[in-house]
Image (cartoon, rainbow, N blue to C red):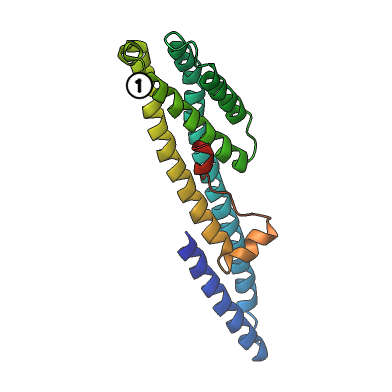
């Protein structure tokens, strides 16, 4: 996409130069052609930005689907573990609070921090299960563990896809001459979804 945009821009510059040269010779036919090319280029670049930003939004929606799936599984996990480890109240509260924080996150920074904390809290629950052989053998627990593991893998895949779209979009709007159009139409850099690993270990 950006290569075609750059090609159109080069053609536009050449046309403008030709138009200026022709004007000195008294022949101005290149001028309307230049104007048409300007409009074509502006429309093309604007539509390209819209397409790319929509891809970023769609990629984020894919992440949200997987995050919601994880949120929905957590109460069942907590309930199952509670049946075998009733005295692990601190761990249960930590998971519940982390889940609430993650579901209430608004900014990308809040998402990164809260999701990392939630991941760490879930890992802590699985760690508790190691001390309870009956819990580890419980079919409901094993099923939840498998579903959460699968969901986590899908979250990571969706996160990589989202970050790839963000990277491509940011490169385009920071490159010349696309950055000129991005500023005119107020397209701005998008944030990457990078988990805060320091929070997961907290």
Q: Nearer the viewer, residue 182 or 23?
A: 182
Mark 1: few, some, or many residues within 10 Å (few <14, many ≥20)? few
Instruction: Residue at 52% x, 74% y: name it.
Output: 10
Q: Is residue 58 above or below residue 76?
A: below
Residue 178 visible in the snapshot: yes
Q: Is residue 135 left or right of residue 65?
A: left
Q: Nearer the viewer, residue 88 or 138?
A: 88
- Quarter of the figure with residue 26: bottom right
Instruction: Residue at 47% x, 25% y: name it.
Output: 70
Point out residue 197 in the picture as x, y percentages from the top left corner: 49, 42
Disc 1 marks which residue? Answer: 130
Q: Is residue 80 above or below residue 58?
A: above
Q: Residue furthest bottom?
A: 25
Circle count: 1
Point out residue 189 in the picture as x, y percentages from the top left corner: 60, 54
Q: Is residue 132 above or below residue 109?
A: above
- Quarter of the figure with residue 140: top left
Residue 195 visible in the snapshot: no
Instruction: Residue at 57% x, 77% y: name it.
Output: 13
Q: Nearer the viewer, residue 22 or 85?
A: 85
Point out residue 74 in the picture as x, y percentages from the top left corner: 48, 20
Q: Is residue 134 left or right of residue 201?
A: left
- Quarter of the figure with residue 134: top left
Q: Secondary structure at mark 1?
A: loop
């Amino acid at each position: 996409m950006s290569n075609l945009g750059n090609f159109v821009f080069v053609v536009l510059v050449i046309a403008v130069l030709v138009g200026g040269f022709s004007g000195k010779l008294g022949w101005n036919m290149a001028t309307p052609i230049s104007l048409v090319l300007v409009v074509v280029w502006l429309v093309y670049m604007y539509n390209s930005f819209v397409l790319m930003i929509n891809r970023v939004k769609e990629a984020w929606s894919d992440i949200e689907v997987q995050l919601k799936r994880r949120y929905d599984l957590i109460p069942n996990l907590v309930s199952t573990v509670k049946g075998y480890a009733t005295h692990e109240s601190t761990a249960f509260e930590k998971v519940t609070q982390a889940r609430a924080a993650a579901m209430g996150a608004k900014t990308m920074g809040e998402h990164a921090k809260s999701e990392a904390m939630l991941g760490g809290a879930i890992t802590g629950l699985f760690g508790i299960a190691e001390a309870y052989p009956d819990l580890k053998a419980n079919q409901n627990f094993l099923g939840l563990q498998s579903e959460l593991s699968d969901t986590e893998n899908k979250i990571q895949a969706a996160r990589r896809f989202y970050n790839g779209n963000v990277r491509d979009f940011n490169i385009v709007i920071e490159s010349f001459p696309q950055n000129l159009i991005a500023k005119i139409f107020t397209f701005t850099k998008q944030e990457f979804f990078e988990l805060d690993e320091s929070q997961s270990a907290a």
